[in-house]
Amino acid sequence: MRVLILGGDGYLGWPTAMHLSNRGHEVMAVDNYLRRRICREEDVQALFLVPTLNERCRLWREASDHQVHARIGDLSEWSFISEVFQEFQPDAVIHYAEQPSAPYSMMSRRAADLTLSNNLGVTFNVIQAVREYAPDAHIIKLGTMGEYGTPNIDIEEGWLDVEHKGRRDTFLFPRQAGSLYHTTKVMDTDLLWFYVRVWGLRVTDLMQGPVYGIYTNENTDTENLAPFFNYDELFGTVLNRFIVQAVTGYPLTVYGEGGQKRGYLNIKDTMQCVALALENPAEAGDLRIFNQFVETFSVNDIAERISRVGNELGLNVQVKKLENPRKEAEEHYYNPAHTGLLDLGLEPHYLSDEALREMMQIALKYRPQVREDTIFRGVKWN
Amino acid sequence: MRVLILGGDGYLGWPTAMHLSNRGHEVMAVDNYLRRRICREEDVQALFLVPTLNERCRLWREASDHQVHARIGDLSEWSFISEVFQEFQPDAVIHYAEQPSAPYSMMSRRAADLTLSNNLGVTFNVIQAVREYAPDAHIIKLGTMGEYGTPNIDIEEGWLDVEHKGRRDTFLFPRQAGSLYHTTKVMDTDLLWFYVRVWGLRVTDLMQGPVYGIYTNENTDTENLAPFFNYDELFGTVLNRFIVQAVTGYPLTVYGEGGQKRGYLNIKDTMQCVALALENPAEAGDLRIFNQFVETFSVNDIAERISRVGNELGLNVQVKKLENPRKEAEEHYYNPAHTGLLDLGLEPHYLSDEALREMMQIALKYRPQVREDTIFRGVKWN
């Protein structure tokens, strides 16, 4: 298939580009380097340098003989996205092109504004470009489990059957997210669901939990092909951050009581899930929703696992409960369904001590470059 | 109170400005004339000319001795809205400043883009400006009953208690709207609800049904102070459009089977509802939602009422069922709650033959100016 990957330079975008080209798809990766720009502006860095998208494509071609096409530009500009669609004529569009940091979205008015206009602007343009230039293309949208928040009922896979005063209907599962970033994804869903109903688009919304890890089948040999591995508060996902904290002797930054439960997955499973969604497309007129994670942990669970494995490696891992800068429940019910992707054939990589050791090894390799001052900033939600 | 009316030049904005200044409030009306601009561009007109906002303020001062302050500018520009807030220091903000036409929002990509970025951009800026300059101000947001769509269960007033697998929680009532315009209002609600939870804003969301009418307590003597009365497909609400169709001998444009039910209200009741919400503010941290209408009709009900009253006046009113250009259910369950505003003291003006005759009289007065070619355009939803 001809697969357009929007946000193809990101933590998940680039691994996805390699993975799908490895599976025989014709891939074009598009990015405006927004994450690189924000990291520069906010003075944070990934654990190791990552080549430009064009350079990555050259390195990947040398390593694999697969060609990934790259285009650099802003998908919220219609003139650019329409060129990309007309040129590439995609069969499927994987939409990662969003400002992905919850703390960044809460940091300032300007950061919130950028998050809102970028994320909705790109999603809107994707819908319009599909409609005009590739009406049968399958849109695979990265949503987030964070859209649901932490309700007091079981979280179903996208939809909820409601019985009310003796009558029944089915609705999108209620969404009430915990950051502006997550709220923009709720709004993306509103927009996609509307145009699915009116125009019969085919859409898969992948409600993903926090991802951890660095290695996929395509980058085991060289960090040159590895994704951004951020350990700062803005762009590091919690497990990745804790790994770097553990190896640098920085006490693990548990917010509040640490009882916050989420559904996690290894980046290897993100690759599987996206490929499964791509190769088993949604029907026209269908908004298909999968909850994309393989197991749930509390923050305390993760801190304990990392402490134990780190201490076995001779690290002296400390845990520090900090006053929670966010506004979130620290103890709550959490029971989300996640059978859809398993039914399609997902074979989960559960969090193993081996996976944690592997991540610690790479963090140890780059330990001298870690900037401890960027680990915790304490962006406050209010 | 010091009341900022955003979208103060609009069909409801200007009558609200007069009404609240008449009730002793200090009022500033702000508008960027977006509706006037779109009407010019799309070559449609209101039934009679309406003076500029500044001129209306002068005329109203002459008529009533009340001063309404006017500012012209684009509230989606931060530099402008922050000036307005710093200067006026509102106790309450009534937010009508949205592109309000469903057909316009479905007409083209550019029109959709304008609708999305204007409506969300202004709502976002209102939230941020309140936070920075008037943190205790009460935001009164005009939502729409259209956010709920036409579910197969009773529509409650904003919220739904859900019991699911033996556990309970309360959520925003499910929203699935019928146009992009209505969908932007769903997204506005997402945004407001998020910042209410995180920042403790005080917000009232008025889920209003289609409004009809022209006279309020403040403009009975002169059309100079009357609101825009649009009869074109883009900006005319259904009942107002049918009135003009009836007096010009244009068959009433019923879409499809005409069984579409909605909750209606007289513009006099919009005035009451907004004043009641203003003078009984929401608590800090509360998103208070009222369903703002007084009675439900199907399109056929309205067509029949107008035909009967029109024929009694000697008009020869025809009804024509057209192929529905929209995507909507033409026969559906509809039972929305609407007790909140009644509990606050709303005294409804139900649709009377007298009210219809009064509207027909003014339409007859301006009949020579009616442009029949603008009545039906048939903007298609797909």
Image (tube, coloured by chain):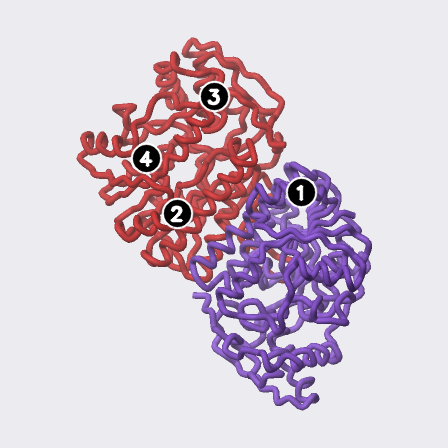
Chain colours: A red, B purple
Residue where numbered disc 1 is placed = B85
Residue A297 vertical position relative to residue B91 in the rendered view, above or below: above
Residues behind callouts 3 and 4 on a single chain: yes
Q: In front of the other: label 3 or label 1? A: 1
Residue A170 vertical position relative to residue A333 in the rendered view, above or below: below
Q: Are marks 3 and 2 in contact (CB under 8 Å)?
A: no
**Amino acid at circle 4:** Trp
Residues behind callouts 2 and 4 on a single chain: yes
Residue B279 placement, left or right of A331: right
Residue where numbered disc 3 is placed = A242
Residue where numbered disc 4 is placed = A14
Question: Which chain hosts label 3?
Answer: A
Residue at coordinates 51% horizontally, 38% vertically from top-left? A181
**Residue A96, image x and y in percent?**
39, 41
**Label 3 SS:** helix
Q: In front of the other: label 2 or label 4? A: 2
**Amino acid at circle 3:** Phe
**Label 1 SS:** helix
Residue A254 vertical position relative to residue A54 in the rendered view, above or below: above
